[in-house]
Amino acid sequence: MTFKLQWRGDKWPGDMQLGEKIAYSGKMEANVPSCVACHGPSGVGVKPGIPRLAGQNAAYLVNQMKSWKEDTRPAGAMAIMGPIAKSLSDEEIKAVSDYFASLGTPVAQKTA
Ligand code: HEC
């Protein structure tokens, strides 16, 4: 599987499935920025502090966002993810989690 780093996908948002669309263009009507704006191209993560989403287990990602939605996970860095999770429906959380999980493990890894 080839893994191409992407900031916004190689399609128009209108041609993307729900999860991919949220990953690359956010949910504008709810002021949710694109996930890759913070989590790095294709969600590979940005050290320090912004974890990788690409290739992560989908159920794990869903659980993290649900726990922010239910205020059971501490607000964390800049208290960013709580409002984001609360602005997404359960269906959207599932879709974006499945999308990042589907990307597999990136080849571009920081070794230093
Ligand atoms: C404005 C920056 C920003 C945006 C936009 C953003 N995130 Fe995050 N995200 C963070 C930060 C910072 C953390 C770490 C928070 C912490 O550990 O307390 C995080 C953590 C997470 C985690 C937890 C991962 C783990 O291993 O604990 C998930 C899941 C997540 N984000 C999903 C998303 C999704 C999906 C989107 C797009 C809808 C998104 N994020 C958009 C900044 C952002």
Image (cartoon, helix red, strand yellow):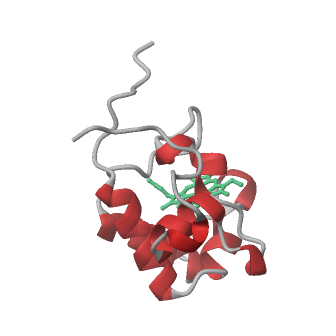
For the image shown, how many numbered marks are present on the structure?
0
Residue pictured at 64% horizontal, 63% vertical: 25
Is 112 located above or below residue 89 in the figure? above
Direction left: furthest residue: 1
Relative placement, left or right, of 2 versus 38 is left
Of 72 and 41, nearer the camera is 41
Q: Quadrant of the C terminus?
A: top left
- Residue at x 64% of width, y 81% of height: 86
Q: Position of residue 98 (x, y in %)?
A: 35, 68
Residue most toward the top? 112
Q: Quadrant of residue 7?
A: top right
x, y percent for residue 94: 41, 78
Left or right of residue 6, residue 94 in this image: left
Q: Residue at (56%, 32%) from the top-left corner?
A: 47
Quadrant in which ligand 1 is drawn? bottom right
Q: Quadrant of the N terminus?
A: top left
Query: Could you tell me residue 62's position as x and y percent?
Result: 41, 73
Residue 78, visible in the rendered structure: yes
Where residue 76 sits, quadrant-wise, is: bottom right
Relative to 8, residue 85 above or below: below
| In this view, 108 is above or below 80 | above
Q: Observer-nearest residue: 94 or 22? A: 22
State the residue at coordinates (76%, 80%).
29
Q: Position of residue 40 (x, y in %)?
A: 57, 41
Can see residue 73? no
State the residue in front, 57 or 82: 57
Along the viewing direction, whichever of 29 and 56 lies nearer the viewer: 29
Residue 103 lies left or right of residue 50; in this view the side is: left
